[in-house]
Amino acid sequence: MDDKTATRNVKAELDQLMAPGMFFEGLPEDTLREMVCHIVSRNHPANQVILLENDWGGSVYFIIEGWVKIRTYNKDGKEVTLNILGTGEVFGEMSAMEEVPRSTDVLTLTPTRICSIPSGDFLKILQVEPLAGIRLSQLMAKRLRQVNRRLRLRESDSISRVADVLLFLAEGQGQPVKEGVDIPNLPHRELSSLSGLARETVTRVLARLEKAELIQRRYHTLRIPDTLALEEVLSSSSTISLND
């Protein structure tokens, strides 16, 4: 590859990282070009492991298109899904900052395109660009808030727990449309892992929510016509009937 081709490739990949909704949106291109020495873009099929727990982190990853899940295992060896990330999201940043092995696995849920940059380049950007540091702090705060909310609902009824997972996905990955908000129509096993419920229970709850017209299921997406109405399900005083 000649220098001109390499330069064009770096610019194209930088443009992806700076696109609307991406982590580096609004940052000076000249600064990023100086800081980021090596950008690598790869396409991954569904169900491919990107990172493994206890690997040492040499890169930070940015999702250009697609969906990944962050998982770990409990003491009984059962898989636990901690998060679902989509376009514009970042992962691998904690290992880069702390210089410790990774604490979770990351694998694709759909065909996914991911850009990665060396951890050292990412840290340099944080040091010289305040906006990047603020954006990372906002990302961490958002994830902590979501975890705290899910922990508060661990002892709630099954309907509240499934509704909370759907709202969690809507907040993180929802695509606003005229008729509501679209989220990925994940397999029930993934919703089961996120909610801590049996897959059969998740299936029954989704059927009830659909019957109550709180969700509309499609092949690739699940639509929430009114997120506020779904929020009411989390309240014990909700008057919405979800009985069979």
Image: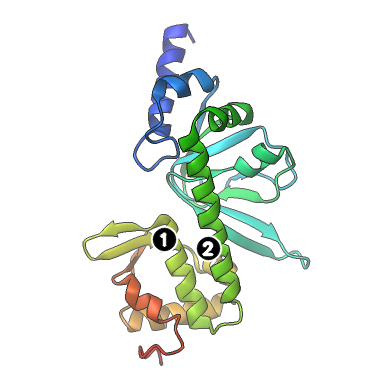
| Residue at the image point whose x is 33% and y is 61% from the top | 182
| Residue at the image point whose x is 37% and y is 58% from the top | 174
Image mark for residue 29: none
Which quadrant would the C terminus be assigned to in this image? bottom left
Total marks in image:
2
Percent from the top left, x then y, of residue 238?
A: 39, 88
Cβ atoms under marks 2 and 1 closer than 8 Å: yes
Assess disc 1: are there few (<14), some (14-19) or many (≥20) residues with their C-alpha within 10 Å of its C-alpha.
Answer: some
Q: Circle 2 sits on which residue? A: 146
Is 81 on the left-hand or right-hand side of 176? right
Q: Is residue 185 visible?
A: no
Q: Is residue 171 visible?
A: yes
Percent from the top left, x then y, of residue 176?
A: 29, 58
Name which of mark 2 and mark 1 comes first in the sequence: 2
Percent from the top left, x then y, of residue 41?
A: 49, 30
| Residue at the image point whose x is 47% and y is 24% from the top | 32
Q: Does dot 1 land on a helix, a strand or a loop?
A: helix
Q: CA distance from mark 2 to mark 1?
A: 9 Å
